[in-house]
Amino acid sequence: MRYTFFAVAVLLLSVSLRGKAQELYVFTEPASNMPAKSLGLRLTNEGIFRGNRMNRTIPELMLSFNKELMIHVQGFLSAMDRNYRLEGGSVYAKYRFLSIDDAQRHLRMSAFGRLSTSKRPTYTQDINLEGDNSGAQAGLVVTQLLHKLALSGTVGYTRAFDLESRRLAGSPQPDEMISYSLSSGYLVLPVRYKNYNQPNFNVYFEMLGKTNPANGNSYLDFAPALQVILNSRTRIDLGYRFQVSGDIDERFNKNMYLLRAEFNFFNVLK
């Protein structure tokens, strides 16, 4: 797994230039943004069934200011440390700087960044900025849409802000991680569009990985998912990610389910 990052990076370059499906990936964000002046509300529950069946709830507000810029504000709540409580929060911003449009296809490239805070006192061999760690992340995402198929690749760098005094004795928590993903989505229904009120059914398959640059330790997850979109405004996701290779085992999101409901409101921002 030492060379996982380099192999996936090559794949991202090769497919980003070749990949009409919904681009609303379940475990990652596409390079495209929400329609301008729109607002979105999400409620996500994710967790694991092993041990004490830990789970986390993530309420999320999404704002799209124009076709280039949007932000997400998240809160993280769980009972992982005995009492159900607010663990922390996160702000994610994405700026689309490249758009190439053609009939039934387009190419998008965006830069993104995230700042997160968490008061959880325990850490793992992974840096997870959605509840487990405080830190910052920056990266690039490329999405290619071709009729009913969408392909997307992401590369990012994450730096943890956790103070040494908050780590458990002997904790293997790294200071930095390189993340990468390769995502595909296919529009199954409707076979032919008649109006925007038709339900959409999408299937997804994503590959999600990280590498610790200090020691080369890595992991790679596969993440299949299903999605239903109603009236072009309401979205329901169901997905599951599981590790297929690697030597980073101590992490919350290993073998994790995800269930999400999202509601969108268009042209509401002045």
Image (cartoon, rainbow, N blue to C red):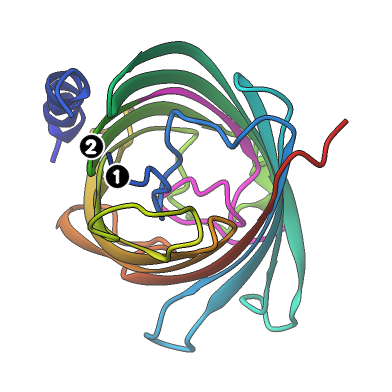
Label pair 2/1, CB-CB below 8 angstroms:
yes
Whether residue 248 appears in this view of the structure is yes
Secondary structure under badge 1? loop
Q: Main secondary structure of the magenta part?
A: loop
Whether 140 is among the magenta residues is yes
Which picture quadrant has residue 116?
Answer: top right
Query: Which numbered disc, 2 or 1, marks the residue that appears first in the sequence?
Result: 1
Q: What residue sits right under mark 1 in the picture?
A: 21
Report x, y in % for residue 133: 60, 49
Whether residue 118 appears in this view of the structure is no
Q: Is residue 23 left or right of residue 208?
A: right
The quadrant of the picture occupied by the C terminus is: top right
For the residue marked with disc 2, what is the amino acid?
His
The foreground one among 175 and 104 is 104
Q: What residue sits right under mark 2 in the picture?
A: 147
Q: Which residues are magenta?
A: 118-142
Secondary structure under badge 2? loop
The quadrant of the picture occupied by the N terminus is: top left
For the residue marked with disc 1, what is the amino acid?
Ala
Give above or below for 265 relative to 38. Answer: below
